[in-house]
Image (cartoon, helix red, strand yellow):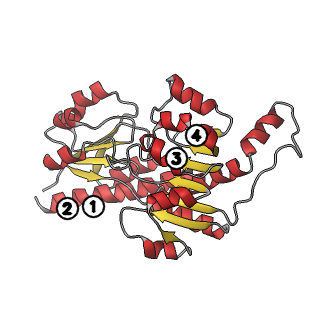
Amino acid sequence: MVLIVEALIVDNVPDRLVFLLEEGGINVNYVPGLQRDELINVLKDYEILVFRSRLKIDREVIDSSKRLKYLARFGVGLDNVDIEYAIKRGIKIINAPNSPSKSVAQLIISMILILERHLYKIIESVKNGGWPKGKILGNEIEGKTLGIIGFGRIGKETAKIAYSLGMKILANDIIDVSNDVKKYEGKQVPLDYLLKNSDIISISVPLTPLTYHMINKNSISLIKNDSILINTARGEVIDTKALLDNINKFKGIGLDVLEQEPPKDNLFKELISHENVIVTSHIGSETYEAMERLSEELAKNILEEVKKNWQNI
């Protein structure tokens, strides 16, 4: 029996993903930018929904299709998906957790170097006609302690690069990662210890009830003065107001994610405009290499699941 499988892709993805799915026998309708109400109207015609982080895949979206069997996230994070309800409905959730790690880790290290050397200030000065030689001194990162909160794929890749640059590694995670950290002559420590003893803190955790606002007024009070804070995870892991209230405590802050994206409220505009803050537009995985790997990994995972279904018919 030939099973006809229809996939709807609602966000921008590389042509490679569309090609691989079609080559695997799936009919693909590629409609990047499809709005929520339009999605709800048409999803009934599809078994597979491929999406990124733009839309909330909640109960209303899921219930708009009795035919839906697979939710495929082009990326890693699933915080925009009602996972519990999807599983209850018997829908398989698929993502590509391995592909973005190198690109995100390289962004983290880039932000550390930019902030330690004040490169953003120097570049801006030169662009505006200045020549601040001898006026802005930076710091080297060798010998500095990097505390990594969340020692999964991205955390490990970050530690690998940082260790090669002579940094000391501390790690915090809810599971035992002590053997992984030892590969970089580091150690796994409680969160309070990491906050108190790190020169630079990088956050690489998923957004869960446990990690929501984990960086708040109380945790910020434990962080060293003149430290650097990097967040490439999810904006909601940091309490933005608490961060802004204590912003002068930090030598530098690098954010690839915000609680509000794109930023519109004055709170976020004030944060972004601070002289010691650099913000990028949620670009952690946006390299050509990561997009290629994401396409390959997600297509492989989708096709494997669909073929399992074929075999059971």
Eyeballing the image, is 184 above or below 259?
A: below
Question: Rounded to the nearest whole Å, what is the CA distance between mark 2 and mark 4?
Answer: 40 Å
Secondary structure found at label 1:
helix
The picture places residue 46, in percent across and down from the top left corner, at: 22, 40
Amino acid residing under circle 1: Glu
The picture places residue 20, in percent across and down from the top left corner, at: 38, 53
Residue ID at (51%, 46%):
220
Residue ID at (89%, 46%):
134
Q: Sequence order check: which comes first, mark 3 or mark 1? A: 3
Front tag of 3 and 4: 3
Q: Sequence order check: which comes first, mark 1 or mark 4? A: 4
Residue position for label 3: 221
Q: Nearer the viewer, residue 223 or 215?
A: 223
| Image disc number at residue 308 | 2
Question: Rounded to the nearest whole Å, what is the CA distance between mark 2 and mark 3?
Answer: 51 Å
The picture places residue 291, in percent across and down from the top left corner, at: 49, 51
The picture places residue 299, in percent across and down from the top left corner, at: 36, 55
Residue position for label 4: 280
